[in-house]
């Protein structure tokens, strides 16, 4: 039960953090929004949202930390 709740908090944190801080780039060649820094055969993309150092791995890690921290708080 607590584990499921922790997982739910983790996935909620994942989508919140991902939507807020994760870097999103726009390809200057085709105009698409992407998580990649390089698109369209070596074309560099420009940052349109989030932080350059926040990629999917950072978001996943932060979300699992949030889940792990939130779980003991449930028992206070
Ligand atoms: Zn492109």
Image: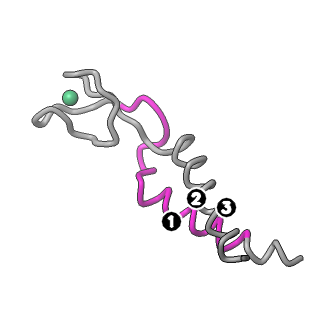
For the N terminus, the image quarter is bottom right
Residue lying furthest front: 1
Which secondary structure type mostly characterizes the magenta part of the structure?
Answer: helix
Is 66 placed left or right of 72 in the picture?
Answer: left
In this rendering, the answer to whether 38 lies above or below 9 is: above
Q: Residues within 10 Å of mark 1 (few under 14, many from 20)?
A: few
Mark 1 vs mark 2, CA separation in Å: 11 Å
Q: Which residues are magenta?
A: 47-70
Q: Which mark is residue 25?
A: none
In this rendering, the answer to whether 56 lies above or below 69 is: above
In this rendering, the answer to whether 38 lies above or below 33 is: below
Q: Are marks 3 and 2 in contact (CB under 8 Å)?
A: yes
For the C terminus, the image quarter is bottom right
Disc nearer the start of the sequence (1/2): 2
- Mark 3 or 1, closer to the camera: 3
Q: Residues within 10 Å of mark 2 (few under 14, many from 20)?
A: some
Residue lying furthest right: 76
Residue at numbered disc 3? 9
Residue 44's quadrant in the figure?
A: top left
Disc nearer the start of the sequence (3/1): 3
Residue 41 located within the stretch drawn in magenta: no
Q: Residue at x 70, y 68 (%)?
A: 5
Mark 3 vs mark 1, CA separation in Å: 13 Å
Q: Which mark is residue 61?
A: 1
Q: Residue at x 57, y 41 (%)?
A: 20
Helix, strand or loop at label 3? It is helix
Q: Which mark is residue 11?
A: 2
Mark 3 vs mark 2, CA separation in Å: 6 Å
In this rendering, the answer to whether 67 lies above or below 19 is: below
Q: Please state the horizontal and vertical placement of residue 58, each as a whole percent of the image.
A: 46, 59
Q: Please state the horizontal and vertical placement of residue 54, each as a whole percent of the image.
A: 45, 50
Is 14 placed left or right of 70 in the picture?
Answer: left
């Amino acid at each position: 039960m607590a584990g499921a709740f922790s997982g739910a908090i983790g996935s909620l944190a994942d989508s919140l953090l991902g939507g807020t801080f994760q870097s999103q780039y726009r390809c200057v060649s085709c105009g698409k929004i992407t998580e990649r820094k390089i698109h369209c055969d070596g074309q560099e993309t420009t940052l349109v949202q989030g932080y350059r150092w926040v990629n999917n791995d950072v978001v996943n890690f932060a979300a699992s930390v949030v889940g792990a921290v939130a779980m003991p708080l449930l028992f206070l």
